[in-house]
Image: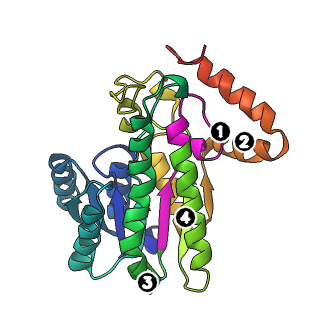
Amino acid sequence: MKKYLNGKVIIVTGASSGIGEAMAREYAKMGAKVVMAARREDELQRISTEIIAQGGEVVYSVCDVVSEEDCKQLINRAVEAFGGIDILICNAGLSMRALFDDCDLKVLHRLMDVNFWGTVNCTKYALSWIQKSKGSIVGISSVAGIHGLPGRTGYSASKYAMTGFLDTIRVENLKKGVHVMTACPGFTASNVRFSALTADGSQQGDTPRNESKMMTPEEVAHIVARGIHRRKRLCLMEWEGRATHFLKKICPAFVDRMFYAMMAKEPDSPLK
């Protein structure tokens, strides 16, 4: 993987923390030219300074993926700095935790804006460059993008939408050499869980789950890199994703009950 990523120009959105930060650091160590994108300039500057101090090549662009113009500027920044784009990783994401009965619809609109439209916006302006390099587009989805998770209607819907969009991009580019992969981490110890929205749109704060038993962002970054190297279509991680993908085909009602029971056991679960 190190040899494969060496010299590749990689854009990572949501790079100021969690999985995105781990990807930026890991891929820079492998010799990639990394373009970091996120809203928090102070964090982007801190991380990029540390990567450069370790000998990595990195630039950043302050970018809210909801903004089409920000995404256009991000792509321009990558091309100006490194001359092209080999890999686009759409990692910026937002989660939620509330029953649909209680949820303000603005929460679902917000999740669609970030998780779905953020992917669309970045892909729109990066696609021609990736076609030239016969590179990769990667969407960081979730187990929630394989099967609906109770209490996460907006999150699941946005990840399903992302998957449908990327699947279609793959088909449209079958003869152009573009690799498209949807990556589905299991529950991961990252800031997305702390910033998850509640029914009224406020942030959740402390996660209800035991972070020590989750995947680390570094593990996810490594698995995604391996998936890109192998040009996989679907990158499943840990048992939740693999089991869900398999069992949904043969006993979907069981998967419904399994996820209900699992989510109902969370502390302060919205499920009754």
User: Which-is-in-front pick, marks 4 and 3?
Assistant: 4
x 36%, y 36%: residue: 191
In the picture as drawn, the residue positioned furthest to the right comes out as 250
What is the crowding at mark 3: few (fewer than 14 residues within 10 Å), some, or many (at least 20)?
Answer: some
Q: Which of 48 and 209 is in front in this view?
A: 209
Amino acid type, callout 2: Ala
Kindly report the distance in space between the C-alpha atoms of the residues bearing marks 4 and 3: 18 Å
Q: What residue type is labelled 4?
A: Leu
In this view, 32 is above or below 62: below
State the CA–CA distance, disc 3 to disc 2.
35 Å
Mark 4 or mark 3: whose residue is earlier in sequence = 3
Q: Does the magenta stretch include residue 114?
A: no
The label nearer to you, 2 versus 4, is: 4
| Residue at disc 3, secondary structure | helix
Q: Is 120 rendered above or below residue 161?
A: below
Which mark, residue 166?
A: 4
Read off the residue under disc 3: 133
Disc assigned to residue 240? 1
Left or right side of 134 for 110: left
Spot occupied by residue 168 in the image (x, y as percentages of width and height): 59, 69
Looking at the image, which residue is at 41% across and 26% down? 198
Tag 3 and tag 2, C-beta contact below 8 Å:
no
